[in-house]
Image: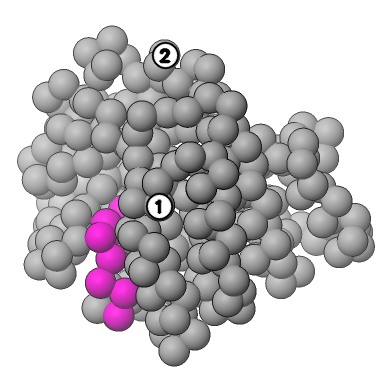
Amino acid sequence: MTARAVYSRSPLTNRDFLRLLAPGGLIVRFQPIVAAPRQGRRIRAVECLTHGVASSGYADAGVLFAEARYRGLEAEIDRACVSTMFDALARRPVPFDLFLNVHPETLRRDGGFAGFLALAAQRATVASSRLTVELLEFGREVVDAALRRGVDSLRALGVRIALDDFGTSPADDQMLRFVAPDFAKVDGALIRGARQPGDLRRRVAALVSRITASGATPIAEGLEVEADAVAVAELGIPLAQGHLLGRPVGLETLALAVPEEAR
């Protein structure tokens, strides 16, 4: 699940921007993904969400990643986020599967990314089979052989694939067929719009049906109030995340991120 923000170009040079991605320049938080959001809310996985330190000017993840895309530095920031995540996990392991965001452009341009991810996981003693790479919505409309190679290189390691913010782009159904993901995360705005029966609820139900028919597992994003959990249950979506179920927190407080009935 990605943060969105208004973006304005920074006067920093690329070299200065890359210094922000050095060790200590990024912070990772972990948000629970839970099963049966109205029936026990058991944690099934956590999404790893990264942003800049407050002093960098990039504490807002949306601004940070928009800057990287503007500069064509998607691969550099994705590698920095991977390193930050596994550095944290090496110090304090977690028993859950891990979801991490990656730009499609990274998989197209960085032929060594899968190997880099595997080595970082190995150093933190995390099995690649516990990882799910979420392809961000930016650049998903480009379906080509380079992206296929990138996805295949991850799958060869046992890494699963998810599509983030699904349902926001006309190209999403094409990507569903092309990538054949393990998960598709239904965009939070669609979930919130489906709180009441009506045309939008029917649209989301059709979307969930297409995801399921493809062989992928749908995940609901952005749950904010109990009415969202009710809608998710009625739509038959088995996994969900959002502030209602647990906010992004550091590893040391992850156990407190989920309400008592969810633990």
Q: Where is mark 1, residue-wise?
A: 128
Q: Nearer the viewer, residue 242 or 103?
A: 103
Residue 165, by quadrant, is bottom left
Looking at the rendering, the stretch of residues picked out in magenta corresponds to 178-185
Name the secondary structure under disc 1. Answer: helix
Q: Is residue 198 left or right of residue 48?
A: left
Please tell me whether mark 1 or mark 2 is closer to you in this view.
1
Residue 204, by quadrant, is bottom left
Residue 140, by quadrant, is bottom left
Question: What amino acid is labelled 1 in the image?
Answer: Ser
Q: Residues within 10 Å of mark 2 (few under 14, many from 20)?
A: few
Visible in this render: residue 214? yes
Question: What amino acid is labelled 2 in the image?
Answer: Leu
Q: Is residue 105 above or below residue 57?
A: below
Q: Where is mark 2, residue-wise?
A: 256
Name the secondary structure under disc 2. Answer: helix
